[in-house]
């Protein structure tokens, strides 16, 4: 029987690639997506569609309203930065940082894993292209993994040894895209934009849109969102 894994799936390019990698490694993935009050909630439907199409065991959508705290351009009425250069993006932790988001998400994933009898959690963090977020760094992931084994009944009793898998952590966006295409990921089903219009169309100018564009350019591949006329 295949081993179950919890895969954090946002509906974006990175997490879709992570799901493909988990499947390739022989896991039976339960995908976990968060309705956290994000302004770009179009990604929730994308995550559901990706999970179904790619053959996950189950998809779960968890509601946790981070708008209660705000403080991020992704959850609050704060302008999303547009048209920034690579240097500007990496100069400081951007306003699109959502306070403690990966810790909150990974904590839910850990609870889901313990209940499901799964030891493996996959997350699409990346420390290379866009390293501005503190909760995307390898040292953070290692610390969380250690904490996970201290914090759970399964960890303490030794029935599970939790592992946080970060297959993209040292990859460039172009490498991620190439890997995903090799594994058959349909990137037309993904959403990257932080500030889409009312119809869910990407703005083309936020950090996430620009990194996606650069990634496809460097990979020498046309973004399928352009081909179907969604992305400028
Ligand atoms: Zn955008």
Image: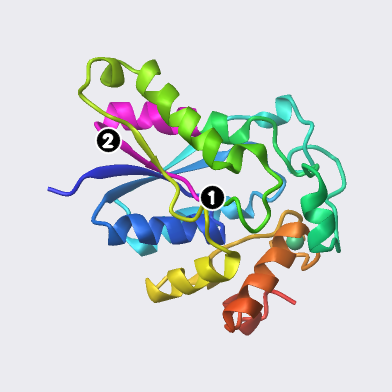
Q: Is residue 127 visible?
A: yes
Q: Secondary structure at mark 2?
A: loop
State whether residue 148 is above or below residue 15.
Answer: above
Q: Residue at x 37, y 71 (%)?
A: 183
- In the rendered image, residue 29 lying in the magenta stretch gets the answer no
| Residue 197 left/right relative to 50 | right
Magenta-tinted stretch: 106-124
- Residue designated by label 1: 10
Residue 205, image x, y percentages = 81, 65
> Depth-wise, is mark 1 or mark 2 nearer the camera?
2
Q: Residue at x 61, y 37 (%)?
A: 135
State whether residue 176 is above or below residue 109.
Answer: below
State whether residue 214 is above or below residue 9.
Answer: below
**Most foreground residue, 6 or 64:** 6
- Residue designated by label 2: 118
Image quarter hosting the C terminus: bottom right
**Most foreground residue, 196 or 182:** 182
Q: Quadrant of residue 5?
A: top left
**Ligand 1 lies in quarter:** bottom right
Q: Residues within 10 Å of mark 1 (few under 14, many from 20)?
A: many
**Most foreground residue, 45 or 73:** 73
Mark linked to residue 88: none
**Most foreground residue, 69 or 148:** 148
Residue 8, image x, y percentages = 46, 45
> From mark 1 to mark 2, how far is it between C-alphas?
20 Å
Indicate which disc, 1 or 2, sits on the residue closer to the N terminus: 1
Q: Quadrant of residue 203?
A: bottom right
Q: Secondary structure at mark 1?
A: loop
Figure label count: 2
């Amino acid at each position: 029987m295949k081993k179950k894994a919890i895969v954090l799936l946002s509906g974006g390019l990175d997490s879709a690639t992570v799901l493909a990698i988990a499947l390739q490694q022989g896991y039976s993935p339960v995908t976990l997506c968060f309705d956290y009050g994000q302004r770009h909630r179009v990604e929730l439907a994308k995550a559901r569609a990706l999970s179904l199409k790619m053959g996950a065991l189950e998809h779960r959508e968890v509601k946790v309203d981070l708008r209660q705290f705000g403080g991020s351009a992704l959850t609050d009425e704060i302008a999303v930065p547009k048209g920034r250069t690579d240097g500007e993006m990496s100069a400081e932790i951007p306003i699109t940082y959502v306070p403690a988001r990966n810790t909150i998400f990974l904590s839910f994933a850990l609870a889901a894993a313990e209940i499901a009898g799964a030891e493996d959690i996959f997350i699409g963090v990346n420390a290379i292209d866009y390293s501005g977020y503190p909760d995307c760094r390898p040292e953070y992931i290692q610390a969380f993994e250690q904490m996970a084994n201290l914090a759970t009944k399964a960890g303490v009793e030794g029935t599970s040894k939790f592992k946080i898998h970060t297959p993209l952590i040292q990859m460039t966006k172009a490498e991620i895209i190439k890997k995903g295409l090799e594994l058959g990921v349909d990137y037309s089903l993904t959403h990257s934009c932080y500030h889409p219009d009312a119809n869910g169309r990407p703005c083309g100018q936020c950090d996430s849109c620009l990194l996606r564009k650069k990634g496809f350019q460097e990979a020498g591949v046309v973004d399928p969102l352009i081909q179907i006329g969604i992305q400028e």
